[in-house]
Structures are given as structure tokens and as C-alpha cells.
Amino acid sequence: MDMKLEVVVVPVTDVDRAKTYYTGLGWRLDADFSTDEGLRVVQVTPPGSPASVIFGHLVTAQAPGTAQGLHLIVSDIEAARDELKRAGADPSDVFHDAGGVFHHGGTDGRVPGPDPKRSSYGSFLSFSDPDGNGWILQEITNRLPGRLDPSVTTYSGGADLAAALRRAAAAHGEHEARTGQEDANWPDWYADYMVKEQSGAELPR
């Protein structure tokens, strides 16, 4: 049976302030419901995300600001940082981890700048909402095998699709250089590359 992560609950102090903050980041407002008993549920969804975020009043016993390490995946970490800054967030500089596997908790092990090889999964930034709930952005450009359904290829928006096309174009240029001839079937090659990149399958050469 599929068990899909649908909602993450984030504890906040001021519901309206949190609503203004997250919608100001461009997150879609899905719901804002209240009951006579004082329960209030606000749901927002980050662009392209299949999972949503809920906050409100009486929705969690967690102390405000205690949600940490919430991950958002992006295809271009530096472009995402620029977007967050324009939206009024205060993101950290891009960093990679000294261990090269996954980031440590807090700020331990942070090395300034993206992963030197710009490896998929290797570059991060962080930001916090007004209550101190901590978010991490992680750059993923090529999924490890088995991480996605190979029969489904989706992109979160035009920018994500454009970034995938640029990576396919660069790889196709290397392909033509190796073969020494122009590839008239480049649309098929692009499509094959983009599907396999997202599913984590072996990429065409």
C-alpha cells in the first residue's frame, strides 16, 4: 500500500504572521479554516511540492520554532536563493558539507559555496520563518536509482523544466562531440536523457 507524505505541521506563534510570510514566499494558500472551539488550520504548499504545510491554532503541541531540518528540493540552489531573497526571506549563503554525504545538524560542518563538483544532493542553504522553524534547501539534479517512479516524469514549473533542458543540451553537445556528427534525432535524445535523469537510470552517452 502506498503511504505518501502529505502534510508537515509547523508550530507558530502568530498564525496571521506565518500566513503572510509563507504566502509571501509564493507558497499557495490551500485552506484557512476556523471552528467555534478556536481551532484554526492554515494549509500552504510550496511551488511544485506534492506535500503541504499546516500551521494554526490548536493543531500541535510543539513549541513554536521547534520544527527543524525541513527539506525543500530545488534544481538550482543559487537561483532558489535569489528567489527567496526577492520574496523577503533571509537565506544563508549556499554551502556544502565537510563530510560530503549529508549536512550536519545546525551549522556544524558547513563549508562555504556549493559542492565543488556541483554533485547532485551536495549543495544546500538554510532559512527560518519568523518563529525560527528551520528549512533546508537541497539541490538535486540527478536522482539516485530507484528514488522516483521511472514511468512518471514531472517538473515543478517552467524554471525547473528549463534547467533540465539546459542540462540535456550540455550533455547532448558532449554526445555529438564524441560521435563527431550532428544528431538529427536530438529531440528523442533529449527526452530519453531527461526521463532517465529524473528517475536515476543510467544516462545516455
Image (tube, rainbow, N blue to C red):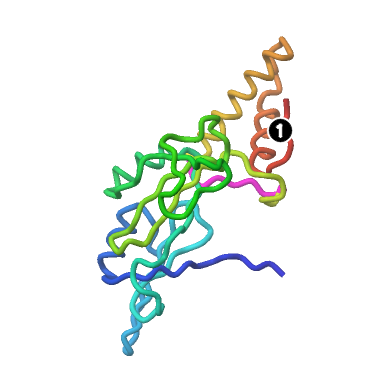
Q: Is residue 95 above or below residue 35?
A: above
Q: Is residue 185 above or below residue 97?
A: above
Look at the image and say whether residue 152 sits in the magenta stretch: yes
Q: Is residue 200 above or below residue 5?
A: above
- Residue furthest to the top in view is 180
What percent of the width, then of the height, locates residue 179? 74, 14
Q: Mark 1 = which residue? A: 203
Q: Quadrant of the C terminus?
A: top right
Under tag 1, what secondary structure? loop
Look at the image and say whether residue 172 sits in the magenta stretch: no
Q: Nearer the viewer, residue 82 or 169?
A: 82
Q: Quadrant of the N terminus?
A: bottom right
Q: Is residue 147 above or below residue 180?
A: below
* Region of the chain picked out in magenta, as a range: 150-158
User: Which image quadrant for residue 95?
Assistant: top left
- Residue furthest to the bottom in view is 37
Name the residue at 53% across, 38% down: 161
Prevalent SS, magenta region: loop
What percent of the width, then of the height, locates residue 144? 67, 44
For mark 1, does the 10 Å Cα neighbourhood hold few (<14), some (14 to 19), or many (20 or more) residues? some
What percent of the width, then of the height, locates residue 116? 51, 30
User: Which image quadrant for residue 117?
Assistant: top right
Name the residue at 40% across, 75% down: 62
Q: Nearer the viewer, residue 48 or 141?
A: 141
What percent of the width, then of the height, locates residue 50? 53, 58
